[in-house]
């Protein structure tokens, strides 16, 4: 983890009409690191990751990937760089099987026409195995039949199958039970151990303390603190979330203390 | 469901039958043995993935009922009649299956098919203009496909529900059929005189060609299945037990050879069955083995997931409605060929109900994302058998409608209840 950050946001801002959703936020994540992103509702977590994903541009500041400034205009460009986002709703087609979902939109064909089912199934299986996802009965069962944790695993496997370097997980453990949460957290750790940079958004501090290396706290659109998790406590993080010091009070020129 | 594992089921901790589909957090169970395969199949059925099961059961029940009530039902003459009767519906229903797969509906197929038939017939009129049949056919199909294109553009670009758009087109096209038929013939009926188009439903393959067709179908199916089996084996992927594969091949062979045998007892296999067979094979390939087909299923299952995966959802929708229009046109030509004419009432009556019912009865879900092209054939068989059987019994029109309605209701109920089965099993 001594490495350079693979993804950096430098002073990025975003406003929607009169609402300043992000104000001069600095954010970074390194390869092999799990960076948590926390904050109360409306703190700007989603705005930040959507900006990184290229869903909309930041108003100011810049994003750097692998040390180079990049402008990401669409989710497709983000994927091309190696940034994959797993949204909370996972976006899986229930009627398709695991393999079809993992390759959706990027199916392999031979002779230019016919789906290469065997090759896709092998790759899907290898990816799932490498992530130690062992609870699937078959990669040919439809996603409708999977449990919440399994669905999350499939969505994550789908994201990392394409040589991605940064994986952003939006609330991966919300709505999961204890065993399922365990499964997903293990998966997150596996990803980081494989050298990927993982960003995890969560409201659950317990999960974050368990899996993350660092945490960036957003409050009212500003990054108020970055903690190394083995050097902090839950109280300190909660305090930052609810009462972290703002460098700037929206709508005012003066600097708050 | 006994647990007689064969030796190759070695290390697996095979889960007990009660910890089933919703929550298999257990180790992988590979369906390597026949009993394991059958058990997994039964699990899927119980979870609501019925596939073609209800329809096959339904066909058997229908055959038993009508066969016991009337001796002619099982005659070879009636069998070829049945084939002729259902092929037009099955063809149109192929297009309907595609539209249902993306969770839309096309109510215009009936009169769109009539438009195709009328245009073809008018273009073929000897000397006026008396176009050669391939050209006339091409123009007719171009028109019906264009209707699908225009409807889909309105649906996708203006965001109007397909139900309303296609309903409006059905009404409008019925007017077009009326205008065309009455303005070219005072009686409102135009005869088809072209021998090729007439021969579609009027000519039969010789016995020898019938057998050759059967061999090609059965052999082709076997080759494809074995090829799939071998490629999976080569990649080290789990396969269905070879016994199951063989059993299915034998089942198909019995049906096909049996069908050809019975048809040959009468006039032979109708030419139109050859056309239908090619269409079914082609569209099955498109739906199950191409990227486009995969995207159709994805759009039907979760349009948002499809969009995020980079699939151009609107383009898929447009293509599907064009397929609906194209197959309506082909089906209309087949139906017109059977009557050797088009008339003011072409495309009317129960046609719309029958083709949509065929797709649904065949196992294509109205909720999108689930179904197979083959369901068009199976559903059309059911509808045709019921109609044919009731005709043989000399039932009144009113009774026929009531019974057909009940068959459709039963099919939709199976669809809805299987969804509920999935929900109850915790998988929906």
Image (tube, coloured by chain):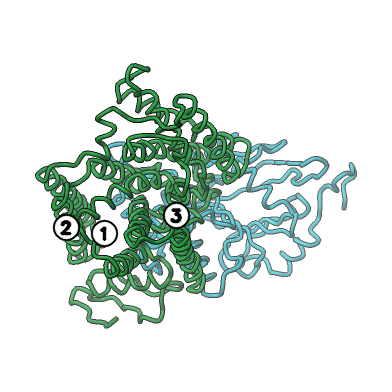
Q: Residue furthest left?
A: B208
- Element at label 2: helix
Mark yes or no: residue A72 visible. no
Q: Which mark is on residue B237?
A: 1
- Element at label 3: helix
Residue at mark 1: chain: B
Mark yes or no: residue A18 visible. yes
Give the letter of the green chain. Answer: B
- Return the x and y of residue B418 as percentages of the image width and height: 46, 67
Q: Is residue B209 left or right of residue A129?
A: left
Q: Is residue B401 above or below residue A253?
A: below
Task: Sort mark 3 into few (<14), some (14-19) or many (20+) by Cα contacts within 10 Å.
Answer: many
- Return the x and y of residue A20 as percentages of the image width and height: 79, 44
Residue at 47% over, 35% down: B344
Q: Which residue is mark 2?
A: B258
In front of the other: A4 or A25: A25
Give the letter of the cyan chain. Answer: A
Mark 1 and mark 2 residues within 8 Å of each other at the beta carbon: no
Q: Which residue is mark 3?
A: B357
């Amino acid at each position: 983890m001594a490495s350079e950050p693979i993804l950096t946001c430098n002073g990025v801002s975003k406003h929607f009409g009169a609402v300043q959703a992000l104000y001069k936020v600095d954010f970074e994540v390194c390869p092999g690191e799990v960076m948590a992103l926390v904050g109360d509702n409306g703190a700007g977590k989603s705005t930040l990751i959507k900006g990184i994903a290229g869903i909309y541009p930041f108003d100011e500041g810049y994003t750097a990937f692998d040390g180079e400034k990049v402008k990401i205009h669409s989710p497709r460009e983000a994927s091309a760089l190696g940034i994959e986002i797993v949204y909370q709703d996972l976006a899986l087609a229930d009627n398709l099987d695991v393999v079809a979902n993992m390759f959706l939109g990027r199916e392999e064909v031979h002779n230019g026409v016919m789906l290469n089912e065997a090759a896709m199934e092998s790759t899907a299986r290898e990816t799932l195995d490498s992530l130690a996802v062992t609870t699937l009965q078959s990669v040919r069962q439809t996603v409708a039949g999977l449990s919440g944790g399994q669905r999350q695993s499939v969505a994550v496997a789908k994201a990392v199958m394409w040589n991605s370097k940064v994986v952003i997980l939006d609330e991966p453990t919300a709505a999961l039970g204890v065993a399922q949460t365990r499964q997903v957290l293990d998966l997150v750790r596996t990803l980081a151990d494989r050298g990927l940079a993982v960003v995890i958004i969560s409201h659950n501090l317990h999960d974050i303390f368990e899996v993350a290396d660092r945490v960036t706290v957003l409050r009212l659109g500003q990054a108020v603190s970055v903690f190394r998790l083995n050097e902090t406590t839950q109280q300190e993080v909660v305090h930052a979330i609810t009462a972290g010091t703002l460098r700037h009070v929206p709508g005012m020129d003066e600097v708050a203390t | 469901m006994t647990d007689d594992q064969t030796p190759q089921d070695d290390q697996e901790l095979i889960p007990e039958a009660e910890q089933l589909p919703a929550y298999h957090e257990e180790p992988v169970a590979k369906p390597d043995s026949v009993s394991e395969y059958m058990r997994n199949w039964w699990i899927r059925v119980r979870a609501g993935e019925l596939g073609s099961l209800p329809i096959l059961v339904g066909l058997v029940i229908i055959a038993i009922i009508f066969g016991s009530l009337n001796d002619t039902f099982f005659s070879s003459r009636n069998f070829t009649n049945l084939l002729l009767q259902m092929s037009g519906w099955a063809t149109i229903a192929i297009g309907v299956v595609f539209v249902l797969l993306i969770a839309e509906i096309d109510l215009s197929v009936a009169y769109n098919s009539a438009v195709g038939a009328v245009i073809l017939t008018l273009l073929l009129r000897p000397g006026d203009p008396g176009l050669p049949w391939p050209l006339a056919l091409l123009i007719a199909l171009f028109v019906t496909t264009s209707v699908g294109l225009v409807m889909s553009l309105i649906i996708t670009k203006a965001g109007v529900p397909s139900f309303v758009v296609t309903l409006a087109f059905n009404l409008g096209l019925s007017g077009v059929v009326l205008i065309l038929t009455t303005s070219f013939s005072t009686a409102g009926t135009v005869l088809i005189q072209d021998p090729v188009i007439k021969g579609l439903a009027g000519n039969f393959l010789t016995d020898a060609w019938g057998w050759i067709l059967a061999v090609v179908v059965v052999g082709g199916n076997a080759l494809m299945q074995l090829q799939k089996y071998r490629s999976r084996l080569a990649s080290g992927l789990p396969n269905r037990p070879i016994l199951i594969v063989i059993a299915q091949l034998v089942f198909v062979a019995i049906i096909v050879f049996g069908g050809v045998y019975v048809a040959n007892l009468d006039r032979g296999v109708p030419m139109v069955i050859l056309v239908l067979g090619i269409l079914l094979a082609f569209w099955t390939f498109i739906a199950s083995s191409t990227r486009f087909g995969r995207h159709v299923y994805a759009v039907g299952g979760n349009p948002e997931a499809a969009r995020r995966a980079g699939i151009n959802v609107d383009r898929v929708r447009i293509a599907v409605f064009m397929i609906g229009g194209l197959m309506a046109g082909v089906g209309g030509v087949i139906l017109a060929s059977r009557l050797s004419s088009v008339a003011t009432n072409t495309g009317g009556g129960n046609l719309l109900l029958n083709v949509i019912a065929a797709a649904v009865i065949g196992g294509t879900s109205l909720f999108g994302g689930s179904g197979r092209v083959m369901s068009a054939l199976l559903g059309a068989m059911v509808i045709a058998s019921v109609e044919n059987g009731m005709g043989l019994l000399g039932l009144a029109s009113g009774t026929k409608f009531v019974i057909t309605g009940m068959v459709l209701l039963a099919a939709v109920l199976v669809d809805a209840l299987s969804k509920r089965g999935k929900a109850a099993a915790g998988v929906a």
